[in-house]
Amino acid sequence: MNFAQEYNIEKQVFNSEGIEQLYDYYFAQEFWPVVYLLKEKNKKKLNAYVGETIDIITRLTTHLNHPEKSKLNEVYLLSGKKFNKSAALDIEANCIKYLSGDGMYNLLNANLGLADHSYYQKEELYYEIFRSIWDKFLELKIVKHTLRQIDNSDLFKYSPYKALSTEQTKSLILILESLLDDRYKNIVIEGGAGSGKTVLAVFLFKLLHTAEEDFNFSAFGPEDQRIVDLVHQLKQKLPNPKMALIIPVDSFRSTVKKIFRHVEGLSADMVVGPADLGKNRYDIVLVDEAHRLRRRVNLGNYFGDFDRVSADLNIDKETGDELDWVIKQSDKSIFFYDEFQSIRPSDVLQEKFDSLKNAPKTKTEYLNSQFRVKGGLKYVNFIDRLLKGDLINTKEKIKLRKYDFLLFNDLEQMINHIKEKDRVEQLARVVAGFAWPWLSKKNKNAIDIRMGTLELRWNSAAAKDWINSKNAINEIGCIHKIQGYDLNYTGIIFGNEIGYEKGKIIIRKDNYYDRNGKNSIKDLAQLKDFIINIYKTMMLRGIKGTYIYVCDEGLREYFARYIPSYNEPIANAARIEAPTVPSIRSVPLYDFTAAAGSFSEQQISGSVEQFPIGNGLRISADHFACKVVGESMNKLIPNGAICLFRKYSGGSRNGKVVLVSHTSIQDADFGSNYTVKKYFSIKKDNADDTWEHERIILKPLSSDPSYTDIILEGDELSRLEVAGVFECVLFSPALS
């Protein structure tokens, strides 16, 4: 399908003469939903505004009277006959989110009321239309980055232009109510890694620095209106609140400063470290990563600054800490906190936060959802039990449909796998526990980690934003370089400071080389908590997948009971010729690459080869295997891989990867009428309340742009047969 045919982009000068020309514009005459981009031109840093309306002439006339929007020079109108109201609001929201992440504009938009709801054909049609619009924006040089580049950027991930979840909205309302209530001084928002704490903190900051007239009232729901009412009351109480966002971790603070530079109404100097509290007092202080606030233990070079600020604030340096600084230097303080991400003895004690949460002047709220890892709460709960040693009675390995979670027995293989993920999808990194000294900190040529023939170095000391640094893919990151960040894939090396003996996870203090992480610790149980928290935090960095290599043999055997192993399918593949008759642990292996007949003819033939299946997969009589050749699906399926499919027996196929046959398809890779592609369908409603397919799109998932969509319409639709639905790769020749 040519999605570019489904919309129009029209450019006009933004002034009264340009608006007058719109009286001949069809979508203005018919009061059709229109999405528009107002922007400046010929400036180094451009202001812009995105909107949606059914009355484009009246809306643009109103903007001409706005003190900031009237300074914009040109308008791009996005319209199409398939633009219903839901679709237009969704395209508007996507434009706002991705333009903010592109970094080319200061958006004048408010961040409340962005549409994020399901509607008919949202993914298969309208998101594809938006992707086509963005490609056109790139061609017109309206934007400078692709959608994938933006998806992987911190500017996008932590942008305040996001629709909040129900939990986040509830917490936001509690925060605003507490800021207005003089009975409360402190607010604690608790949530695990990936629960959306940072997004909520940045969202709140932007919300309180937005003019009320810029809110998009037309898109508000009941909760949005409640938020607007509270913001209105707060602005009457504090017309110009002095605010700071404190981030204790240096590298992550630098990242958030960059984000604030690109958001209208915010500035980088609003993001500060705890020591800045010695110079300024604030109406409202937000603290992200509050579990990393420090006390006077193992501070290294920071002892002098700690003592100076404590003296300036008249707080005892031995008994006080950075938590006390925040409370003293703010009228209202908001802490985003996770006790399970405390990783050093210098962190403020959990007992201190417990006391704060239980104080009568403190309000507490919890974020339980998981927004980062696609494994969801099932994965989060699993790793919590795994690292506590609570899986003894669990008999099966974890199965995650949308998350790549694997145990590697070969470290070089895991590193190569991460490098390939980084090449295709970007933001894949290898990290490790502190089981090796940092020799390369003082000698750049030194090797930090030697394992077999592998020679590896820790992250560069000079790289503040290590994850996005040029050589990060060739280095090993530590917890201090990744805490607070998102990755697409994380490869984790569990070092010899952690092991498994006599049915328990154990810690070896002598093998732990973070000096400031273990000095002064007398209780080994406390060190164990810190090390477990480090690995748990690492295991919650990867959005799409986590890979693990374990040095300790006992711990590796323990993990192997519950985590699928990367090489299990390879071991099975070595026995491919062994079974000649069907067995409980094998499936038919069909040869579609040379198939002259139909799928059913191969089933009946009786000469079908059998492919053995490992114990980690559930199979039934409906499962079969086939070899997938070529590069058209290489983002998911390597060339030559043997894949497991389930026979299609009905139900929705939308968005699934399927094996199909069609008389008019001659797949260049398969050499037959079969092909494997991602399936999308566009339906149309009939007058008798039935529906039928209008168009079926078979999409490649390839890094090679020469592979294009296969589009079936009209009479072609009836000749399509879906043979099976893809489940997983059983064997990849690249890894054998």
Image: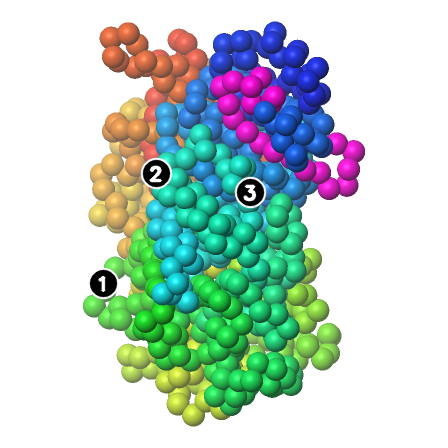
Q: Is residue 45 magenta?
A: yes
Tell which tag, 1 or 3, sits nearer the viewer.
3
Residue 211: numbered disc: 3
Magenta stretch, residue numbers:
41-61
Q: Earlier in the sequence, mark 3 or mark 2?
A: 3
The reply to whether residue 617 is visible in this rendering is: yes
Q: Residue at x 53, y 21 (%)?
A: 34
State the SS at label 3. loop
Tell me how far mark 1 sits from mark 2, CA to CA.
Answer: 47 Å
Q: Earlier in the sequence, mark 1 or mark 2?
A: 2
Residue 222: numbered disc: 2
Q: Are the residues at dot 3 and dot 2 in contact (C-beta closer than 8 Å)? A: no
Report which residue position mark 1 lands on: 395
Locate residue 632, reporting x and y percent: 53, 33
Q: Are the residues at dot 1 and dot 2 in contact (C-beta closer than 8 Å)? A: no
Tell me how far mark 3 sits from mark 2, CA to CA.
Answer: 20 Å
Q: Is residue 417 left or right of 617 when viewed as pictured?
A: right
Q: Residues within 10 Å of mark 3 (few under 14, many from 20)?
A: some
Q: Amino acid at mark 3?
A: Ala
Q: Earlier in the sequence, mark 1 or mark 3?
A: 3
Q: Residues within 10 Å of mark 1 (few under 14, many from 20)?
A: few
Q: Are the residues at dot 1 and dot 3 in contact (C-beta closer than 8 Å)? A: no
Locate residue 448, reporting x and y percent: 63, 76
State the SS at label 2. helix
Q: Residue at x 64, y 81 (%)?
A: 305
